[in-house]
Amino acid sequence: MKPLRKIIFPAAGSGTRFLPATKATPKEMLTIVDKPLIQYGVEEALAAGMDQIIMITGRGKRSVEDHFDVSVGLELTLQQAGKDKLYNIVSRVSNMAEVIYVRQKRALGLGHAVLCADHWINDEPFGVSLADELIINEKPAMRQLAEVYEQTGCSVIGLIEVPEEQIHKYGIVAYVEENGLMRLTDMVEKPSAKDAPSNLAMMGRYVFTPRLMELLHDVKPGRGNEIQLTDAIAMLAREEPVYGVRLQGQRFDAGSPEGFLLANAILGMQHEEYGPSLRKALKEYL
Ligand code: G1P
């Protein structure tokens, strides 16, 4: 079995739900407590041993590249000023991972975004992570998937149960139990609650065999006239086993302003350094 080293981050979306905050700043760079959203995703991938990162970006995303790049001037200034703690934080980010940037020139859907990384996959297994879905757990979400990949050598999808009224926002799976694992038999992109095969939603964490990339070439525009990743996964599941994992952790929909604010509030209150005083201050305000 080939080791899982590569991971794709689709990050070309325009972030209109966050306007005007995202007028000149990519949504991936909006801060959750003390670091940009995309850094949570990258740290999670690294904790799962995936250290070859392929970021799918587009116009206006330069600050994402700068964030993971070395900032010689800044690092020197911090060093000379004896600000060791800050220097360590800044230099750790720039040395975190090898990142390749690929531009998605047109917004043709999530499947199309993943296909943009085709050239860099080289017949290897790969992860896909949607950083908007922020999942916090001691065993990071991608690690939870990687363990099932290591056990089976098959594709694995992260799942979370959603209430009926939210089913129409997600890719929903059908499954059967098989040897203690959940084998996915079908998946539908954003069905109505009455047509949904279950209430288990694909929650932005995927590990794929390289076959998925080949199948993506054949996917025709589907829901919303977009090239849907879900449609390629359904094709894959007809050819080879695809397993589901119920993700453990606190999950925030950081792609919506409400979920983003909630993540800041909850993770802020849980933060080692800022948490105690924030909780105290909030009690006084509320
Ligand atoms: C995408 C996927 C969907 C998945 C969701 C998770 O949808 O197409 O299958 O359930 O992410 O957030 P989007 O939110 O990009 O519309």
Image: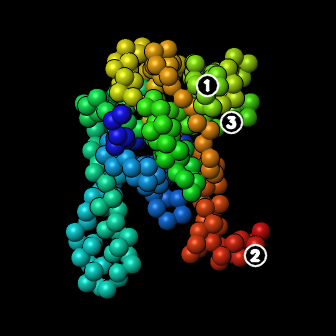
Q: Does residue 57 appear in this view?
A: no
* Three-letter amino acid code at the position of disc 2: Glu
The numbered dot on residue 30 is none
Q: Secondary structure at mark 3?
A: strand
Quadrant location of the C terminus in the rendered image:
bottom right
CB atoms of marks 1 and 2 within 8 Å: no
Q: Which residue position holds label 1? A: 178
Q: Amino acid at mark 1?
A: Glu
Beta carbon at label 3 within 8 Å of ligand 1: no
Image quadrant holding the N terminus, namely: top left
Q: Nearer the viewer, mark 2 or mark 3?
A: 3
Residue under the image location 39 percent in, 24 percent down = 212
* Figure check: 195 above or below 115: above
Q: Which residue is drawn at the image coordinates 41% and 16% (left, top)?
A: 219
Q: Earlier in the sequence, mark 3 or mark 1?
A: 3
Q: Residue at x 46, y 62 (%)?
A: 35
Q: Which residue is mark 3?
A: 161
- Name the residue located 61 percent from the left edge and 61 percent from the top edge: 267
| Residue at the limit of the structure toward the front, as seen here | 179
Residue 80 higher or lower than 125, as above or below: below
Q: Secondary structure at mark 1?
A: strand
Separation of residues labelled 3 and 1 (CA atoms): 19 Å
Label 1: few (<14), some (14–19) or many (≥20) C-alpha neighbours in 10 Å = few
Callout 3 amino acid: Glu
